[in-house]
Image: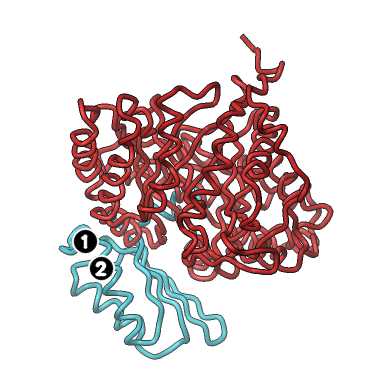
Chain colours: A red, B cyan
């Protein structure tokens, strides 16, 4: 049984510390929708998604009301669309439109899975599919896209890396009247996971059940508040406090995930133990690091503090959930975290430091705005660096970067809502095009040969 | 099915009466009640059986939140499972 203090603590977490369930994401397999033509496939896709997820918004609202914990986002992830239209890749945008329409009908926030998995090589139909991504992101609202360009097992597909640099540029350019928001809905992955509930990188892997419910928990504010109670604790004690807090947060996620799965007639997939910030004050991962004793995030010691935070969150969360998966770790998206935004505005955090931080946390260079005139090959080189970190360290890494059209260092992009705003950060001006234009593969590391 | 009703705010006359009358009219049975007063701050926690309440729990929670606004308090109604999950191993 729980005590009165437990009840009041939970209410304070929600009221003052921004505890929420960040997302309920329903993963839906669309493999059964493949038909002879793109038009028929698109129709089938729309019908199936609308049917399977028809109650997701209501269920989330009900659960939120019953448990007294906000559920911020309702989302759907689907089978990588490139697989659905291997026979007619040029017509993939029809499927993209059908998915975006379904998302609008359902009233969900985002739908992920306009994706391709090309970590070893790019099949001809994948090449054609990837070329459709920028236009599709510019003409849809809720659809998100991701491409897996590498893995520990297969190395890095540098042709795909090159294509993705160009895709980010084009996606931003085609949405230049909205600060390049198209690029904010696109992710390049290394070691992509099949059960990620978070956007923009969610897709429903082919190894998954027909319909699953994955839940992403959050609560940077709760962790920060807990640490404020022990300002003079040493780091061992601080790590313990983070673990205990992560346990409580995750238990709430586990309860919601199981109940949501039951009500939606889906299999319970995983709980993703991520600390996901929002632009709201007090809901920031950067501010946790500052609470631990870094004057400003980005300063020396940031990587160490983040490593401890990330590990403690996992240790607390793993015990709290029967099935853990997704990305599970602390997110450090610049535009979605008020502490990060401030550090970037002061020039205290750089792309290089962010890259170092991604070695020890999930997931990668996330929601970073860079000058609009950055060459595509430089963006590809940034993706290659990040993919290399993921490949060698056997972890997921990702790049979601916005080359803001017509903007330069000193300017800002603003997307509103959860996507937030970000100052333009400088990139190295030196040329990396020869590396990118070499093509080929970066071979898988020696430690991947485990059989 | 049991829910936890939490009423917090500045101490005032008749809070328990108003909230418990409202709940009993809805068909809820109060099983346990406790309250603490810290200075001006008032916190009352009730365990109620809501099996006989005809409305859905989320609707009851909304109505109680509304009642809270009328009497100048914050009222939360939450399924007991959330506390069992978060605070028990």
A300 lies above or below B43: above
Residue placed furthest toward the top = A451
| Residue A69 at x, y percent in the picture | 41, 60
Residue at 68% over, 44% down: A378
A275 lies above or below A296: above
The residue marked by circle 2 belongs to what chain?
A: B
* Label 1 sits on residue: B56
| Residue A409 at x, y percent in the picture | 70, 64
Does label 2 lie on the same chain as label 1? yes
Q: Residues within 10 Å of mark 1 (few under 14, many from 20)?
A: few
The label on residue B60 is 2
Proximity of marks 1 and 2: CB atoms separated by less than 8 Å = yes
A323 lies above or below A166: above
Can residue A197 be seen here? The reply is yes
A154 lies above or below A199: above
| Residue A341 at x, y percent in the picture | 65, 65
Can residue A9 be seen here? The reply is no
Residue at 26% over, 45% down: A98
Is residue A325 left or right of B81 when viewed as pictured?
A: right
Q: CA distance from mark 1 to mark 2?
A: 6 Å
């Amino acid at each position: 049984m729980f005590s009165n203090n437990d009840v009041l603590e939970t209410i304070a977490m929600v009221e003052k510390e921004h505890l929420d369930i960040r997302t309920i994401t329903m993963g839906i397999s669309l493999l059964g929708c493949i038909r002879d033509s793109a038009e028929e496939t698109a129709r089938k896709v729309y019908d199936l998604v609308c049917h399977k997820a028809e109650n997701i918004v209501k269920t989330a609202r009900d659960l939120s009301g019953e448990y007294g914990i906000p559920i911020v986002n309702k989302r759907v992830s689907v089978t990588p669309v490139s697989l659905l239209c291997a026979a007619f890749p040029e017509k993939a945008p029809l499927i993209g439109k059908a998915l975006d329409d379904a998302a609008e009908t359902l009233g969900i926030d985002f739908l992920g899975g306009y994706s391709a998995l090309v970590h070893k090589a790019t099949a001809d139909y994948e090449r054609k599919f990837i070329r459709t991504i920028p236009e599709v992101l510019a003409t849809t609202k809720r659809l998100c896209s991701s491409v897996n360009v590498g893995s520990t097992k297969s190395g890095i597909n540098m042709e795909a890396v090159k294509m993705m640099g160009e895709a980010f540029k084009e996606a931003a350019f085609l949405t230049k009247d909205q600060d390049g928001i198209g690029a904010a809905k696109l992710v390049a992955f290394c070691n992509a996971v099949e059960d990620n509930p978070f956007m923009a990188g969610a897709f429903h892997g082919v190894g998954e059940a027909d319909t699953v419910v994955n839940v992403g928990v959050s609560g940077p504010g709760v962790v920060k508040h807990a640490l404020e109670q022990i300002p003079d604790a040493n780091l061992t004690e601080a790590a313990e406090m983070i673990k205990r807090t992560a346990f409580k947060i995750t238990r709430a996620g586990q309860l919601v995930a199981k109940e949501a799965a039951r009500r939606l007639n889906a299999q319970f997939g995983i709980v993703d133990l991520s600390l996901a910030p929002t632009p709201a004050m007090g809901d920031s991962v950067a501010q946790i690091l500052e609470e631990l004793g870094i004057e400003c995030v980005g300063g020396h010691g940031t990587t160490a503090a983040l490593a401890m935070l990330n590990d403690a969150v996992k240790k607390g969360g793993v015990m709290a959930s029967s099935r853990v998966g997704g990305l599970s770790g602390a997110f450090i998206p610049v535009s979605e975290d008020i502490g990060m935004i401030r550090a970037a505005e002061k020039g205290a955090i750089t792309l290089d430091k962010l890259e170092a931080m991604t070695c020890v946390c999930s997931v990668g260079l996330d929601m970073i705005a860079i000058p609009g005139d950055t060459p595509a090959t430089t963006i590809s080189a940034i993706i290659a660096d990040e993919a290399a970190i993921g490949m060698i360290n056997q972890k997921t890494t990702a790049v979601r970067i916005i080359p803001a059209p017509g903007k330069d260092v000193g300017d800002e992009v603003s997307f509103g809502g959860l996507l937030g705003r970000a100052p333009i950060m400088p990139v190295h001006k030196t040329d990396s095009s020869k590396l990118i234009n070499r093509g080929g593969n970066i071979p898988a590391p020696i430690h991947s040969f485990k059989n | 099915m049991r829910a936890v009703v939490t009423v917090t705010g500045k101490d005032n006359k008749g809070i328990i009466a108003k909230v418990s009358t409202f709940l009993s009219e809805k068909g809820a049975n109060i099983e346990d009640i406790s309250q603490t007063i810290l200075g001006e701050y008032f916190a009352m926690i009730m365990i109620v059986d809501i099996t006989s309440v005809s409305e859905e729990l989320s609707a009851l929670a909304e109505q109680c939140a509304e009642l809270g606004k009328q009497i100048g308090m914050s009222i939360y109604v939450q399924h007991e499972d959330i506390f069992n999950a978060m605070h028990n191993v």
